[in-house]
Amino acid sequence: MTSGAVSIRQIYKAYGSYKALDGISLDIAAGEFLTLLGPSGSGKTTLLNVIAGFERPDSGSLLVDNTEFIARPPHKRDLGMVFQSYALFPHMDVFANVAYPLKLRKADASTIRSKVTKALETVHMAHLAGRRIHELSGGQRQRVALARAIVFEPKLLLMDEPLSALDKNLREHMQVELKRLHRTLGMTTIYVTHDQQEALTMSDRIAVLDRGRIIQLDTPRAVYDSPNCKFVAGFMGDTRFVPVEKNGSDFALSGRPLKVRAAPAKASSDIFLMVRPERLRWHGTPERDNRIEGNVIDVIYLGDSHMVSVELPQSTEISIRHTGAETTSLPKPGDRLALWMTPESSVIIDGARS
Ligand code: ADP
Ligand code: MG
């Protein structure tokens, strides 16, 4: 019985002296939706290509359902793959594109007809089965690519930035659809993106990559709320870092003691309070909450709200949204402003990289 559990052990891959993958180990449960998230050049595509078999690593092991895959050619790995560029066959129609993997597997005509139809229905493209690829929009092409990747019911689905060529509305729509598709079909999915919002929306777990290493591997909530270093904290959301002082095991901001939910066990001298717009409050209680004071430097109209930027000492800048529902009126540039954070949303981040 194959179920699609993946175990990656100590994968290294260098291009010349550059370490594209620098000791990657990762276990992915059967049926899990795991996202590789990281900036451009962090090794996401290289890792996906190692899993797909397009790239042979210098060393390491890749087990799929406890079978060693590292030397197995791509076509014998039985996995579906979707790329950023659709990689469809332009001279074939939609049906023939989706039928292709089944033809390779020597499926008979009636099996091909029923499976292709089902896959096209899954991605809402059955009505366009006879269309040529160049007659399709970007979103429709990506649906065809997806149908082609799932038509042979692989245990493993790999996707490399599949939505990044689409505009924002369509991308968000497709995110929801992909998530539903995963829930329905249940195959193990390894998804690559550089977009943190996309990773947070779609994943069971996120592996944050930087320079060929996994920096943090956790649920979206944990990666967002409890980042393990400044790199991860800065990569997730609109994050600002406010320098704080350290007194023994306590922290202080402009001399005022801070009440915090989390702090690194052994902090260096380079330490910050992690501040995001949605964590700041217009009101607070001095005995309970943390007070942050500064000068308003910008008030920007966003349609549904205003973004108010506040400069703190040491020229750190933080921002808070004003929605109009607050009892506080909208401040103006030059105003002195006191903002608040609850202890539960106050997290200390060590700037030193482990
Ligand atoms: P990502 O997908 O995260 O943007 P990649 O995995 O494509 O990153 O690349 C990781 C690093 O390896 C980059 O610095 C890239 O330039 C380098 N790299 C990737 N493929 C090759 C190759 N075939 N030859 C040389 N360098 C490569
Ligand atoms: Mg890439």
Image: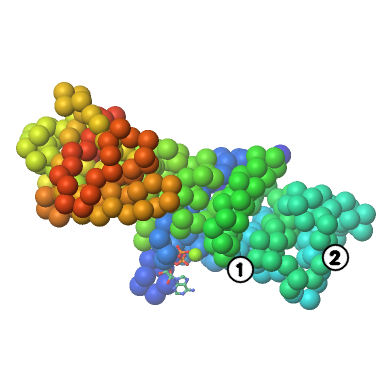
Query: Visible in this render: residue 99?
Result: no
Choose top left, top right, bottom left or bottom right for residue 84. Answer: bottom right
Q: Say which residue label 2 marks.
A: 130
Amino acid found under the numbered disc labelled 1: Ser
Instruction: Compute the Cα span from label 1 to label 2.
Output: 21 Å
Amino acid found under the numbered disc labelled 2: Gly
In the displayed orientation, state which residue is furthest to the top.
Answer: 287
Report the side of 221 relative to 62 (left or right).
Answer: left
- Label drawn at residue 248: none
Of the pair 255 and 28, the residue shown nearer to us? 255
Q: Is residue 204 above or below residue 98?
A: above
Residue 44 in percent (x, y) is at 47, 60
Residue 292 in percent (x, y) is at 17, 39
Tell me if the residue at label 1 has its CB under 8 Å from ligand 2.
no
Numbered disc 2: secondary structure: loop
Quadrant including the N terminus? top right
Point out the frontmost of discs 1 and 2. 2
Task: Please name the residue shown 93% across and 54% down the image.
Answer: 110
Choose top left, top right, bottom left or bottom right for residue 160. Answer: bottom right
Task: Please name the residue shown 40% across and 60% down the image.
Answer: 39
Residue 64 in percent (x, y) is at 60, 48
Q: Say which residue label 1 marks.
A: 85
Q: Residues within 10 Å of mark 2 (few under 14, many from 20)?
A: few
Q: How many marks?
A: 2
Residue 21 in percent (x, y) is at 42, 61
Task: Please name the residue shown 60% across and 40% down the image.
Answer: 30
Disc with the residue nearer the chain's start (1 vs 2): 1
